[in-house]
Image (tube, rainbow, N blue to C red):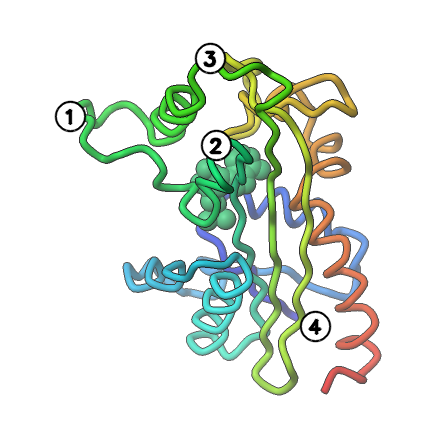
């Protein structure tokens, strides 16, 4: 069975392939691998206010253009002191007024998050990463899986791996930030790992057994 992974991020694709490697019957393809060149209208699929709606819209968009079952996710960081922000707006949290275009978006987002939290004590800087995965195959009702990882937002970045808010996100279970974890450790503890492991079970149960209707 072939499934298109609806992401343009090489980092995410690698993470998802790693988490789903137990699904040996499934071949996971990238948009480029099936000849789908980047189209700016893809970005419009992330216009909703919930992770579920965004993941479903993205999976539908890629399914409609490829004819293949498409697996998408939407993820982000929810910070309690900010009433759940940046949430579905995590990718574009920092205002875009910075004139220095060479500085990447992740660094600006992290700085903006630190500024918004000010000197709030660590115990109050509670947060969670959320990931919702959706599979749309056009024949059956979509499959949806959600994963969450609780943590604390540090006052300064730590670690060099990962992406996005990883250097600020402290995981109390391991005593490290997500940027200090190996890919395997992050997959075991992280929101994407949890969502895609659940999705892996759903795919196995419903699609591969032929009972997905
Ligand atoms: P999307 O799911 O690609 O739309 O991700 C939205 C944004 O959430 C990313 O650009 C990151 O800023 C943030 N994010 C999602 N997952 C992670 C993660 O695992 N680590 C760090 N940041 C993340």
Counting residues from the N terminus, which is met first, the one under dot 2 or under dot 4? 4
Distance between mark 1 and mark 3 Cα atoms? 26 Å
Q: Position of residue 35 (x, y in %)?
A: 42, 65
Residue 85 shows in this picture: yes
Distance between mark 2 and mark 1 Cα atoms? 20 Å
Q: Which residue is drawn at 70% across and 53% down?
A: 196
Which circle, 4 or 3, is nearer the viewer?
Answer: 3
Callout 4–callout 3 Cβ contact below 8 Å: no
Distance between mark 4 and mark 1 Cα atoms? 47 Å
Q: Is mark 2 within 8 Å of ligand 1?
A: yes
Q: Residue at x 75, y 68 (%)?
A: 203
Q: Position of residue 52 (x, y in %)?
A: 55, 62
Which circle, 1 or 3, is nearer the viewer?
Answer: 3
User: Disc 4 designates what residue?
Assistant: 1
User: Disc 2 designates what residue?
Assistant: 164
Q: Where is residue 209 in the image (x, y as percent from the top left)?
A: 84, 79
Distance between mark 2 and mark 3 Cα atoms? 21 Å
């Amino acid at each position: 069975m072939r499934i298109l992974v609806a992401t343009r991020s090489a980092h995410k694709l690698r993470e998802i392939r790693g988490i789903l490697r137990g699904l040996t019957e499934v071949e996971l393809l990238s948009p480029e691998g099936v000849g789908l060149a980047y189209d700016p209208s893809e970005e419009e699929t992330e216009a909703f206010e919930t992770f579920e709606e965004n993941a479903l819209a993205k999976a539908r968009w890629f399914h409609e253009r490829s004819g293949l079952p498409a697996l998408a996710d939407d993820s982000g960081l929810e910070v309690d002191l900010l009433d759940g922000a940046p949430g579905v707006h995590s990718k574009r949290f920092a205002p875009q007024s910075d004139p220095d275009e060479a500085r990447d978006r992740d660094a600006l987002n992290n700085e903006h998050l630190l500024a918004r939290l000010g000197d709030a004590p660590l115990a109050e800087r509670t947060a969670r990463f959320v990931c919702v995965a959706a599979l749309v195959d056009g024949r059956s009702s979509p499959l949806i899986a959600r994963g969450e990882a609780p943590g604390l937002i540090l006052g300064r970045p730590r670690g060099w791996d990962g992406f996005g808010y990883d250097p600020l996100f402290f995981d109390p279970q391991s005593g490290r930030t997500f940027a200090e974890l190996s890919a395997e450790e992050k997959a075991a503890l992280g929101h994407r790992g949890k969502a895609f492991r659940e999705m892996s079970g759903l795919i196995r149960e419903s699609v591969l057994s032929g009972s997905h209707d």
